[in-house]
Image (cartoon, grey):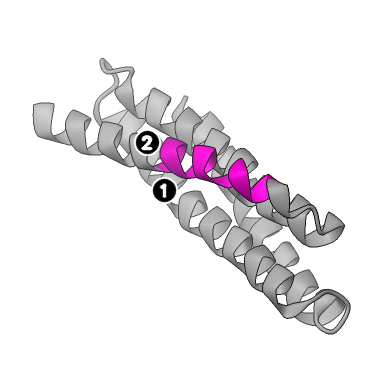
Amino acid sequence: MERTFFIIASLLGSLSVALGAFGAHALRGRIEESLLANYQTGVSYMFYHTLALFAVAWAVSKWPASSLPVWAGWLFVLGVVVFSGSLFVMAFTGLRWLGAITPIGGVAFIAGWLLLAFVAWRN
């Protein structure tokens, strides 16, 4: 599983850089500033949780008997898809009601971090 999370993290990392550059160069001046700020928040949280997935890969190898790091990893992936994804779609479409979905991804992020803390504390 650590290989899976390492690969996902590597791909999300490259995507974060590409989306960040796209936002900075192609979107500036084309979408309103508040939507661009939402887009950049999505990029930032994607990148932060790319780093978290590298920590998950390490935790999976450190505590192979526990399924909690694996759950944390999938929660981070879900968080990226829902949190960052909803902000990206909102930026491109202007559908601000998607902001109501974004906190679901945030809860997934929080749960993933708490699982990592718990597995480290328990072991």
Asked if residue 107 is positioned above or below residue 30 in the image, the reply reads above
- Residue 70 belongs to magenta span: no
Residue 11 at x, y percent in the picture: 66, 47
Between the C-alphas of marks 2 and 1, the distance is: 9 Å
Residue 25 in view, yes or no: yes
Question: Residue 66 versus residue 32: which sits nearer the camera?
Answer: 32
Q: Where does label 2 land, which residue?
A: 112
Q: Where does label 1 land, which residue?
A: 52
Residue 93 at x, y percent in the picture: 85, 55
Residue 78 at x, y percent in the picture: 56, 34
Residue 123 in view, yes or no: no
Q: Which disc number belongs to residue 120?
A: none
User: Does dot 1 land on a helix, a strand or a loop?
Assistant: helix
Front tag of 2 and 1: 2
Residue 72 at x, y percent in the picture: 39, 31
When asked about the image quadrant of residue 28, the answer is bottom right
For badge 1, the amino acid type reads: Ala
